[in-house]
Amino acid sequence: MSLLPVSRLVAGYGFTRINIADDLFTSDKVRVYAFCAELKRRGIKIAWSAFARVNTVDAEVLAVMRGAGCDTVSFGIESGNAEMLKRVKKGGTLQQLSDAGYIKPLAGAATTRWYWTHNNRSDSEY
């Protein structure tokens, strides 16, 4: 895994924090593990955060991310209604929403959630 962009931001520009604004970053655990391992191997000490979906994380992935400097994982919460979650077709369930709220603090990272409001489209609009 190439960390050249991260290395340049840290060494060349003095960045002390980055955000991975890809809510599918955690969907590929091999990629997450490789990214975290490479940060450690190169000794890149930077605080970072990432977007994620509740159906792509577990305690193990979050612990690995935390061990590599991740201090915040942000979740998109489309709805607290099971039917609406099915309509938006992102794969999350109410149980996963609940679990993410408990797993993250156990892994030592902050909890951030993004909410949709007025999400009341008809089935034909999805």
Image (tube, rainbow, N blue to C red):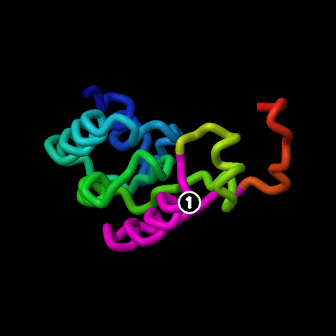
Q: Residue at x 33, y 40 (%)?
A: 11
Considering only vertical position in the picture, is 106 above or below 117? below
Q: Residue at x 40, y 62 (%)?
A: 71
Q: Residue at x 43, y 41 (%)?
A: 13
Q: Position of residue 88 (x, y in %)?
A: 68, 40
Q: Amino acid at mark 1?
A: Leu
Magenta stretch: includes residue 49: no
Say how many tags the image has: 1
- Front residue of 74/4: it is 74
Considering only vertical position in the picture, is 87 above or below 62? above
Magenta stretch: includes residue 103: yes
Q: Position of residue 34 (x, y in %)?
A: 22, 36
Residue 4 location, quadrant:
top left
- Residue 66 placement, left or right of 94: left
Q: Position of residue 126 (x, y in %)?
A: 76, 31
Q: Label 1 belongs to which residue?
A: 94
Q: Which segment did they paint magenta?
A: 92-115
Q: Position of residue 80 (x, y in %)?
A: 67, 61
